[in-house]
Amino acid sequence: MDRYVRLAVIGTGRIGKLHVENIVRSIPQAKLIGVADIDHASATEVAGRFGIPLAVADYSELLNRPELEAIVICSATNTHAQIIQDASQAGKHIFCEKPIDFDLSRIDQTLAMVADAGVKLQIGFQRRFDTNFRRLKESMTEGLIGTPHLLRVTSRDPAPPPISYIQVSGGIFLDMMIHDFDMARFLINSKVEEVYATGSVMVDPAIGQAGDIDTALVTLKFANGVIGTIDNSRQAVYGYDQRVEVFGSQGMLQAGNCQTDTVILSNDDAIQRTLPPFFFLERYQQAYQSELQAFIDAILKDKTPLVTGDDGRAPVVIGLTAQRSLVENRPVRPDEIETDILKEMNR
């Protein structure tokens, strides 16, 4: 019989349910033996729907099971670091949705525990596994546009999340744009040396009252000279807007929005086509499946995960740098954030 990995999913909300479905239906090398959620009814419902034998409210019940090899963390952000630490001490491999935490000291403590335990940790930046963005990256690696000069990333949601979510999200830079920071690092493969951020409240005044912004533009300067710009909006009335452009010495690469179909209507009024997918679950369905397949492959083949803990830490640093830049209205170097962390540790 072929080898498979025994998994459990912690957190059975929207993204947890998606991962459960992908594992059960699309990844034969993985076997789900349990799910956990503080809402036990939610865990029970998901377990029943997908034929999973165990549903618990306390995830430690899963970690204590010797047959369990790995976990997929889809719980609230403020639980990620603790669950990673507990899982590493239990000797389980870990896939965790972004971010690891909002606090760099806690991230560093967590990553140290993972390293000491010798388990694998993959962070859920699913856009790296999107076929369009991966092809763009491969084309860059093949040298098809020469030396990159400029990067442009656009990411706009169709509608803002509830204010209750905004209040615990960590802000637009650590919640929404963190994916774009990771994409920038993935494509350019160079250290970000300076960040300048500006932003406004253009969509919903309540977002401003919650201490956040809903419209942002960030400039990144990389060590290799590339200049990047990222723009985010919490509301694009036409759907989920996800585009990337890289301009280089010998050409340009672009990855545009996916469409729900390829039909184009042309008549004497206009040329029309369908809108992009409405939200991230539809846009990145394939990417979510591919990232979990990569996690399983890393375990079975004893390889380093394609998105490591360090890859999970770096966009948080950039996000914190952007936050400071916005508040202080100046370019900020990520090294300033790192220096502050060292000062705190030495107190």
Image (cartoon, rainbow, N blue to C red):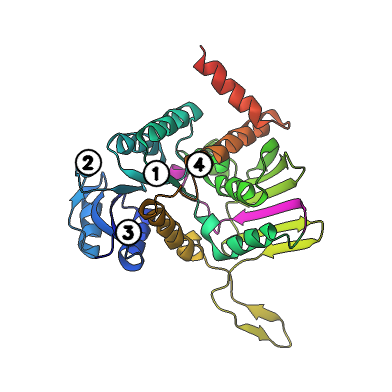
Q: Which residues are magenta?
A: 146-165
Inspect the image, locate mark 4, and give the three-letter code of the amino acid beneath it: Gly
Queried whether the magenta region covers residue 17, the answer comes back as no
Q: Position of residue 308 (x, y in %)?
A: 48, 44
Pointer 3 and pointer 1: residues touching (CB < 8 Å)? no
Q: Which residue position holds label 4?
A: 312
In the image, 184: left or right of 88? Answer: right
To which residue does mark 3 refer? 20
SS assignment at label 1: loop
| Left or right relative to 29: residue 172 | right
Using the rendered view, name the quadrant where residue 271 is placed: bottom right
Q: Which residue is mark 1?
A: 120
Which amino acid type is shown beneath numbered disc 3? Val
Separation (CA) of disc 3 from disc 2: 18 Å
> Around disc 3, counting alpha carbons within 10 Å, would you say few (fewer than 14), some (14 to 19), or many (20 or more)?
many
Relative to the observer, which residue lies in front, 118 or 25?
A: 118
Q: Which residue is mark 2?
A: 58
| Residue 346 screen position, x and y as percent | 52, 13
**Mark sitting earlier along the chain (4/1):** 1
Between 161 and 154, the one lying in front of the other is 154
Q: Is residue 326 above or below residue 121?
A: above
Disc with the residue nearer the chain's start (1 vs 2): 2
Q: How far is mark 3 from mark 4, CA to CA?
A: 22 Å
Choose the circle earlier in sequence order: 2 or 4.
2
The local crowd at label 1, few if under 14, some if 14 to 19, many if 20 or more residues have their Cα within 10 Å, is many
- Work out whether residue 237 can be spotted: no
